[in-house]
């Protein structure tokens, strides 16, 4: 039937080879579709389909927050000093420095810690493995620790060491330790957790020792600088408390090597400083603390390998 033939209701064509063939539309009918048009529309639907699911968008937000906070930590440490709005952290620390404060060279540990934090944030942003519930907890714990470090840096530069700074650094220690323990628990099942186990451990280990140094500075700020004998007695107690806390966390983290290394670095630097300043009892106590943390770590690793 020619395409310009008059149309009638129900007008249709049958396949010439099969009387039972399904009725098809006339080729001239504007409603007829070309298979190529169908494939093009299908491809367009793929192109304009939403690019992410709610879970993917949540991961994007979570990894973005982690990355921003990882970058904010080193920047915040120099913000007040560079802007002239407040004193540097070094100056604030020197004002209340006690025997438990590590020597200045020991703070170089922040360089690898910051690099590890950034590596963790990049893995969260560009890693291909799906995030499980444990991975989400690890990411948020690390975000809380990074936020606490940033807040502590700004607060210490603005107001010095005191009860607010102690509360902030203690919260950061708790968050970093929680991230480390959770990462060690699921590291066999998650690539992100394995990275977090390597990066959260050093942060938690250093903050454990730094928290007790901050407590010493806070007591000096509130009650004034103690005499030499009083400072030595107080420092002995703080070293013992730091050693106990580090040993407990080393055991809870199943012997995380990064945690033990950072805690031993802090206690060892305190021992070295007190040895140089002729405080032998404090030097010995700090050295015993190093040995205690390392023994607790080895015992925990041996126990979990059984």
Image (cartoon, rainbow, N blue to C red):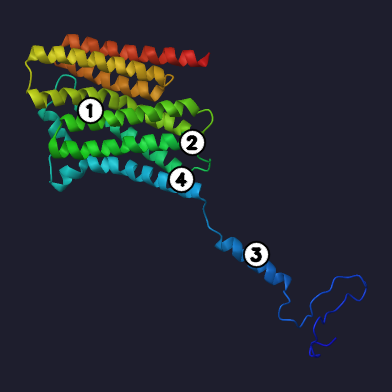
- Residue highlighted by disc 4: 59
Query: For the residues carrying marks 1 and 2, which lies nearer the camera in this image?
Result: 2
Q: Earlier in the sequence, mark 1 or mark 2?
A: 1
Residue 100 rendering spot, x and y as whole percentages: 19, 20
- Residue highlighted by disc 2: 133
> Closest to the observer: 198 or 63?
63
Q: Earlier in the sequence, mark 1 or mark 3?
A: 3
- The image quadrant of residue 262 is top left
- Residue highlighted by disc 1: 105
Query: For the residues carrying marks 2 and 4, which lies nearer the camera in this image?
Result: 2
Q: Residue at x 33, y 27 (%)?
A: 204
Classify 10 Å Cα crowding around label 3: few (below 14), some (14-19), many (20 and above).
few
Q: Earlier in the sequence, mark 2 or mark 4?
A: 4
- Distance, label 3 to label 4, CA atoms, is 29 Å
Classify 10 Å Cα crowding around label 2: few (below 14), some (14-19), many (20 and above).
few
- Distance, label 4 to label 1, CA atoms, is 38 Å
Q: Earlier in the sequence, mark 4 or mark 1?
A: 4
- The image quadrant of residue 180 is top left
Classify 10 Å Cα crowding around label 4: few (below 14), some (14-19), many (20 and above).
some
Which element carries disc 2, helix, strand or loop?
helix
User: Which label number is shown at residue 42?
Assistant: 3
**Most extreme residue toward the front, as rendered?**
9
């Amino acid at each position: 039937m020619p395409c310009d033939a008059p149309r009638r209701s129900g007008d249709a064509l049958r396949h010439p080879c099969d009387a039972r063939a399904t009725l098809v539309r006339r080729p001239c009918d504007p409603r007829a579709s070309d298979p190529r048009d169908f494939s093009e529309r299908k491809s367009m639907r793929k192109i304009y389909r939403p690019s992410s699911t709610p879970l993917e968008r949540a991961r994007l937000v979570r990894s973005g927050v982690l990355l921003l906070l990882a970058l904010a930590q080193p920047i915040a440490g120099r913000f007040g000093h560079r802007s002239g709005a407040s004193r540097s952290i070094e100056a604030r620390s020197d004002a209340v420095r006690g025997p438990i404060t590590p020597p200045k060279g020991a703070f170089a540990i922040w360089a690898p810690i910051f690099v590890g934090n950034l590596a963790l944030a990049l893995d969260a942003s560009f890693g291909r493995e799906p995030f499980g519930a444990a991975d989400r907890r690890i990411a948020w714990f690390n975000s809380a620790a990074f936020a606490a470090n940033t807040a502590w840096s700004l607060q210490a530069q603005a107001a010095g060491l005191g009860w607010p700074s102690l509360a902030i650094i203690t919260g950061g220690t708790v968050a970093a330790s929680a991230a480390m323990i959770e990462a060690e628990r699921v590291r066999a099942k998650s690539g992100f957790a394995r990275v977090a186990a390597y990066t959260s451990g050093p942060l938690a280990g250093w903050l454990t020792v730094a928290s007790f140094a901050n407590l010493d500075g806070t007591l000096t700020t509130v009650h004034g600088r103690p005499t030499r004998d009083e400072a030595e007695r107080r420092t002995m107690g703080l070293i013992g408390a730091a050693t106990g806390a580090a040993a407990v966390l080393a055991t809870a983290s199943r012997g995380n090597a990064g945690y033990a290394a950072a805690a031993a670095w802090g206690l060892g630097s305190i021992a070295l400083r007190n040895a140089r300043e002729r405080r032998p009892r404090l030097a010995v106590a700090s050295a015993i603390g190093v040995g205690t943390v390392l023994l607790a770590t080895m015992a925990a690793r041996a126990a979990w390998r059984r």
